[in-house]
């Protein structure tokens, strides 16, 4: 699947994909819809892109005026593609890439000393990763009140009940994909 940046400073730039079927990039039409919904959240945002894969969500945010993005993924091939896509777009100064097991913990964020006000999560479908990652985000104290979390998920894996300080504010369906927008309320 050909990936490209949809709008902003990097509009039309092509992105490399991760070989094979391990990584499921967010389709252009879903990414465009998400960013239309987010519009004012993106300008000057400090973004965390979890399960980043190709980095399409975080790079789209940078293209649309985000201040910086931290990309995190555990897959070695995905991290290699992330490095190439960040370099090809010239965003090295505004991006940091971490190879980390996000589900286990987010301790890698502690050394960054920053709060993320926009988080993208695109975990593998139907692997029950949403709840542990939300718990790690909360316990990692890396979110300010009012942070927005955007989760791309399977329709068969809804947002778990009682997600602590995360409140579902919007949810959209795109065929087999569900996109949930949560607010971090303390």
Image (cartoon, rainbow, N blue to C red):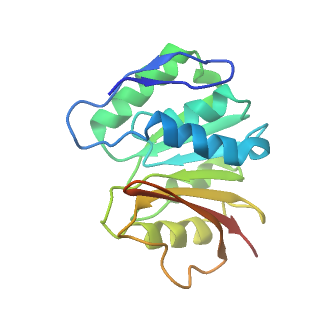
Left or right, 3 with respect to 7, comes to left
In the image, 117 versus 152, the foreground residue is 152
Looking at the picture, how far across and down is residue 163, in whole percent?
56, 79
In the image, 176 versus 137, the foreground residue is 176
Q: What residue is at 44 percent from the left and 72 percent from the top? A: 158
Q: Quadrant of residue 155?
A: bottom left
In the image, farthest residue toward the left:
20
Looking at the picture, how far across and down is residue 13, in whole percent?
52, 16
150 lies above or below 39: below
Numbered disc total: 0
Left or right, 69 with respect to 129, comes to right
Q: Quadrant of residue 180?
A: bottom right
State which quarter of the image contains the C terminus.
Answer: bottom right
State which quarter of the image contains the N terminus.
Answer: top left
Q: What residue is at 72 percent from the left and 59 percent from the top? A: 147
104 lies above or below 162: above
In the image, 146 versus 39, the foreground residue is 39
Left or right, 17 with respect to 89, comes to left
């Amino acid at each position: 699947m050909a990936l490209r940046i949809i709008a902003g400073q990097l509009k039309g730039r092509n992105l490399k994909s991760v070989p094979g079927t391990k990584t499921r990039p967010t389709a252009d039409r879903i990414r465009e819809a998400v960013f239309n919904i987010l519009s004012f959240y993106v300008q000057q945002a400090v973004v965390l892109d979890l399960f980043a894969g190709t980095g399409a969500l975080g790079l789209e945010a940078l293209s649309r005026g985000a201040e910086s993005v931290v990309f995190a993924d555990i897959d070695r091939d995905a991290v290699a593609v992330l490095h190439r896509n960040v370099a090809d777009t010239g965003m090295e100064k505004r991006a940091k890439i971490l190879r980390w097991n996000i589900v286990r913990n987010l301790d890698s964020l502690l050394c960054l000393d920053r709060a993320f006000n926009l988080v993208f999560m695109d975990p593998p479908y139907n692997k029950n990763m949403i709840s542990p990652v939300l718990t790690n985000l909360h316990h990692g104290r890396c979110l300010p009140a009012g942070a927005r979390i955007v989760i791309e998920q399977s329709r068969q894996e809804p947002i778990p009940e009682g997600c602590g300080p995360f409140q579902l504010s919007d949810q959209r369906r795109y065929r087999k994909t569900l996109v949930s927008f949560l607010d971090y309320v303390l």
